[in-house]
Image: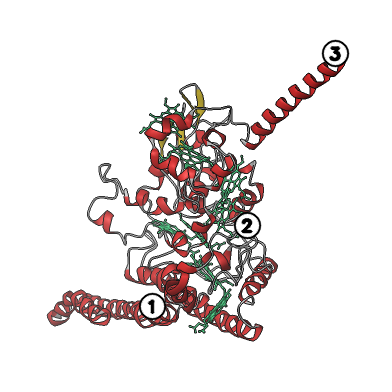
Amino acid sequence: MRGVASVWVILVSTLLLVLTAGAGEEFREPGAPCLSCHDTVTPGIVKQWEESKHSKVGVKCYVCHQAKEDDPSGFDHFGYRVTAVVSPRYCESCHPKQVEEFSRSKHAWAAFIGPLKPWYREMVKQGRDPLSQETAMESNPREFIRGQLTPLYPDSGALERIGLLDDESYYQENQVLGCLQCHGSYVIARDGKLVDGWPNNGIGRINPDGSMGSCTACHTRHRFSIAEARKPETCGQCHLGPDHPQIEIYEESKHGTIYASSGEEWNWDVPPGQWGPEDIAAPTCATCHMSGFGGVVESTHDVGARLYWELQAKKSTPQWDDPSKVPLGEQKPDEEQAKRGRAEMKKVCRTCHSSTWVDGYFESFDRVVMDYNRVYEYSEKLLNQAYDEGLISRDNPIDELPEVMYYYIWHHDGRRWRMGASMMGPDWTHWNGAVDALMDKLNMMEEWLQMKRENRELEERVSRMESRKVCAPSLSVLLALLPALAYGVLRRRRG
Ligand code: HEC
Ligand code: HEC
Ligand code: HEC
Ligand code: HEC
Ligand code: HEC
Ligand code: HEC
Ligand code: HEC
Ligand code: HEC
């Protein structure tokens, strides 16, 4: 009898063990019937999930989509509490390192450092918490930034002039599908409904659960693939265009042309930490900025970790210390961190190049940045002088020609000048960068100011003459013609 009982005990406990082990593998998904419906409701999503690593290791739908108790975006869905906004907090239990690194990167802060900066500052000034859903519901960030007159929303005064700036029925919706689509914005949820800011995959999205960022910006659902994230096109979705043409620079560089000619044959699926120069013939964005590579650098989700300079800033300084201080304007350059970043980046280069090659390259790149800084300082002095002399006014900071030119010098041409040099894109360094900044914008700025000064002198002479009751019709005619003359000279310069 004893023998039979112990056989039963063994059988039952084995069965229990198998069951719990199974539950462990499935990450304790309580058998939610998501697939049965979604097979037909959203077959594309199910197909992509089936192709993912997650499906192989049993990370099913409800593992990610089960809403956390305190998440206001959770809603009842056929008896299950589900959310559509799977924020970094939902990945954190299994990928704590990636979430931690990403959260302290500028990527996570991109909405507040970018388009929502004026709103963030105002809320802090009023003593309100910019990360709370209540604050966003009381003062809608998207409404707040509409009609802001700052160089963040450059329209050179055109909207005000044509009467659309304060027109309620002019939506300024380019901000939503422009700025916010790259940078991210607030997702506001009320009682399980996404009432504002959705859909949204911007990299610095502010989630209803208070967390920041969106992993989907690079790992599109539901494949969540590293192969995809390692390819330059993934980054090029946002890193392009006149003010940060990283993908264009890359395409022009030797690295990019090698990728274009043989990239299809490279090994993209190598497990994290094992990727190296034996798998690819030239680096991609991820290789230099993020990947664990060649056994010499660990992977990082903090894209600032391998940089020395702030190349997007008006004047380049070593990397700022803490992205959370950037919207507040309290950031300081951190030379030590910047040096560590440079050392990490060089390690990547040296998996394929000699140290002479790499050091020589960086020495020249740093000189480019310092040259640019000199030109920036000059243009800033020029602008301030113009304000002091009363040649232009500070009311709208970007509606008069010198203001617009100054903006182009740092925000467009000057960035291209520096960024082209940082990633081996000579055409961007020279023609689209230095030449555009110096020959076009700086010259235009100086000439306009010179003309304005001459105008003013003439005006003063005329009024002196008039006050002496000297009739000077020829001068008055000349004065009336001056704006047209000035315009003609400028057009000729630009053409
Ligand atoms: C009885 C069928 C059914 C079941 C079971 C089901 N869903 Fe759905 N689900 C739907 C339908 C229908 C939609 C709406 C699709 C649409 O709007 O086009 C939907 C939508 C969703 C959405 C998107 C909601 C939004 O606002 O965008 C998510 C996320 C979701 N389901 C997840 C799940 C998860 C996770 C499970 C398992 C716990 C599940 N579903 C179970 C039918 C189902
Ligand atoms: C690894 C976590 C994860 C798993 C597993 C997962 N999802 Fe998602 N799902 C996401 C993320 C992330 C998003 C994008 C929303 C966002 O940006 O936060 C999303 C979005 C969605 C949406 C709304 C997006 C749209 O385009 O309408 C639906 C519906 C959805 N998932 C259904 C499913 C279903 C069904 C499964 C199972 C086959 C599943 N998900 C498995 C993370 C996951
Ligand atoms: C319940 C645990 C769990 C959750 C939640 C989870 N993952 Fe994963 N994830 C895994 C496991 C396990 C792997 C496979 C690791 C391996 O192959 O070594 C994986 C792999 C990955 C990979 C690498 C895929 C590849 O091609 O090698 C990415 C990217 C990823 N997850 C992103 C996410 C994101 C983003 C979220 C949140 C939206 C998320 N995961 C949520 C467990 C999870
Ligand atoms: C959805 C848009 C988006 C995608 C995709 C994206 N980025 Fe970014 N990235 C941004 C924005 C916006 C910023 C500016 C953030 C800021 O300054 O707040 C940024 C900043 C950066 C920075 C500067 C960080 C710093 O600390 O100065 C680096 C480097 C970077 N990204 C690299 C990458 C790489 C590499 C990829 C692809 C693997 C990538 N990004 C994908 C939007 C994106
Ligand atoms: C195509 C995607 C995209 C759009 C649209 C976009 N940005 Fe950006 N923005 C970026 C990227 C990428 C960077 C990072 C550039 C870098 O670090 O080299 C950036 C950088 C910035 C920065 C500098 C952040 C810092 O670290 O100092 C600000 C501010 C900014 N953007 C504001 C805006 C505003 C406001 C708009 C709309 C008027 C806008 N952006 C539109 C992608 C975009
Ligand atoms: C060969 C390596 C390499 C490749 C490939 C590369 N980068 Fe860079 N990147 C650099 C270096 C080096 C810097 C400058 C670092 C420094 O300041 O010391 C830089 C700077 C940057 C910056 C910072 C600009 C700022 O505002 O401070 C961004 C953003 C960036 N890269 C994005 C990208 C993107 C997106 C791609 C792909 C399209 C890419 N990089 C490809 C090496 C690379
Ligand atoms: C800027 C683009 C970008 C964003 C945003 C991003 N990832 Fe990644 N992720 C990558 C790249 C590139 C790799 C491949 C790194 C490599 O080659 O070693 C990767 C790899 C991974 C891996 C595989 C393990 C590893 O570290 O290599 C996991 C897991 C992962 N990411 C999770 C996440 C999670 C969770 C988030 C959101 C918090 C996220 N990622 C956001 C670009 C991104
Ligand atoms: C995975 C290998 C690999 C990595 C990593 C790599 N490179 Fe390269 N690089 C190459 C190859 C291959 C060439 C083409 C050499 C030739 O012309 O034969 C090249 C070319 C160059 C050139 C010459 C560009 C030109 O137009 O002639 C420079 C400069 C350069 N790399 C700098 C760097 C720097 C700086 C880094 C690190 C930030 C780096 N590389 C990382 C493989 C790599």
N-terminal of the pair, mark 3 or mark 2, is: 3
Do the numbered discs 3 and 2 sit on residues whose CB atoms are within 8 Å? Answer: no
The amino acid pointed to by label 3 is Met
Q: CA distance from mark 3 to mark 2?
A: 71 Å
What secondary structure is marked by label 2?
loop
**Looking at the image, residue 131 lies above or below residue 231:** above
Mark 1 → mark 2, Cα distance in angstroms: 31 Å
Q: Is residue 321 above or below residue 432?
A: above
Residue at label 3? 1
Residue underneath mark 1: 432
Residue under the point 71% across and 26% down:
15
Q: Amino acid at mark 1?
A: Asn
Q: Residue at x 66, y 46 (%)?
A: 96
Mark 1 falls on what kind of element? Answer: helix
Hey, which residue is sitting farthest top in the picture?
1
Amino acid at dot 2: Asp
Q: Measured from the top left, where is residue 292 in percent x and y?
A: 63, 63
At numbered mark 3, what does the secondary structure look like: helix, strand or loop?
loop
Is there any visible trace of residue 393 in the rendered image?
Answer: yes
Q: Dot 2: few (<14), some (14–19), or many (≥20) neighbours within 10 Å? A: some
Q: Answer whether residue 390 is visible to the viewer in this image.
A: no
Query: Residue 283 occupies which quadrant of the picture?
Result: bottom right
> Is there CB contact under 8 Å for labels 1 and 3?
no
Of the pair 417 and 393, the residue shown nearer to us: 417
